[in-house]
Image (cartoon, rainbow, N blue to C red):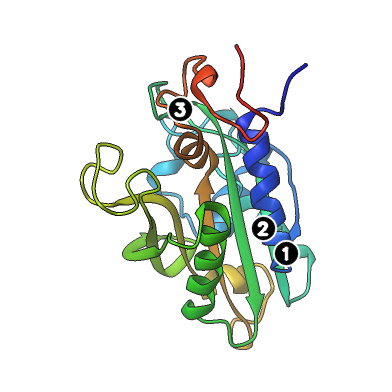
Amino acid sequence: LGVKHPITQTIDEMSKIFMNMGFEIVEGPEVETVFMNFDALNAGPNHPSRDLTDTFYITDNTILRTQTSPVQARTLLTKEPPMKVISPGRVYRCDTPDATHSPVFHQMEGLVIDEDVTMADLKGTLDTFAKALYGEDVTTRFRPSFFPFTGPSAEVDLTCVNCHGKGCRVCKGTGWIEVLGAGMVNPKVLDMCGIDSKKYRGFAFGVGLERIVMLRYGITDMCVSCLSSAKTKSGGIKQ
């Protein structure tokens, strides 16, 4: 007897939340082209993420995807607006394993394209998601940032689910925990994918699922078998 892995449980629950908001699940290959992973997302030839120190190359033009964003590019190239999609999946980066990093991890990204989409729609979507996942007392905070795929862009924090904003060891006394990046889709990306950027606008977001899982289940090290400390609705996980 056993239960689903915490990552699988979290993917299922997050997917259900977004599907209730009208999102469709889309998937794509883990072995990707350089064009789809970088160029179609406005990450030019000199972008640091394209270095061998950051990305696993199979050939000069084929890689293990570093994000699930290529699924968004493929969706833009094959679907007509309006669209609301999420893309959960496994991704790969040349990270040295430690308590919070792994060369293999999971992401869930979202994309909304329609007429008259604004930053307010993005914030409302993420507010709804955060409250559905963590409870009504959780709020979001946007901080300015930069991503080639979006602009304006933001790092998004949630009220610390451990101390509820009071400040603790988990949030380093700030009351907030950074969980995802988001922003309005760059018009260059829309044009490159054949979408009329003068007619359509949109937003995108991406969250590292291991971060969400560790916060929800009290896992302190993603590189060791520490699931015995995770509490689940089914009564706990046994080693």
Q: Residues within 10 Å of mark 1 (few under 14, many from 20)?
A: few
> Which sits earlier in the primary sequence, circle 1 or circle 3?
1
Closest to the observer, 139 or 88? 139
Mark seen at residue 81: none
- Is 182 positioned to the left or the right of 76 in the image? left
8 is higher (above) or lower (below) than 87: above
Q: Residue at x 36, y 66 (%)?
A: 142
Give the alpha-carbon distance from disc 1 to disc 3, as whole Å. 28 Å
Percent position (x, y) of residue 32? 67, 40
Give the alpha-carbon distance from disc 3 to disc 2, as whole Å. 23 Å
Q: Residue at x 27, y 52 (%)?
A: 175
Give the alpha-carbon distance from disc 2 to disc 1, as whole Å. 5 Å
Mark 3 lies on residue: 219
Mark 2 lies on residue: 17
Q: Residues within 10 Å of mark 3 (few under 14, many from 20)?
A: many
Percent position (x, y) of residue 149? 49, 62
47 is higher (above) or lower (below) than 118: above
Closest to the observer, 123 or 229? 229
Residue type indicated by callout 2: Ile
Mark 1 lies on residue: 20
> Which sits earlier in the primary sequence, circle 3 or circle 2?
2
Q: Residues within 10 Å of mark 2 (few under 14, many from 20)?
A: some
Q: Secondary structure at mark 2?
A: helix
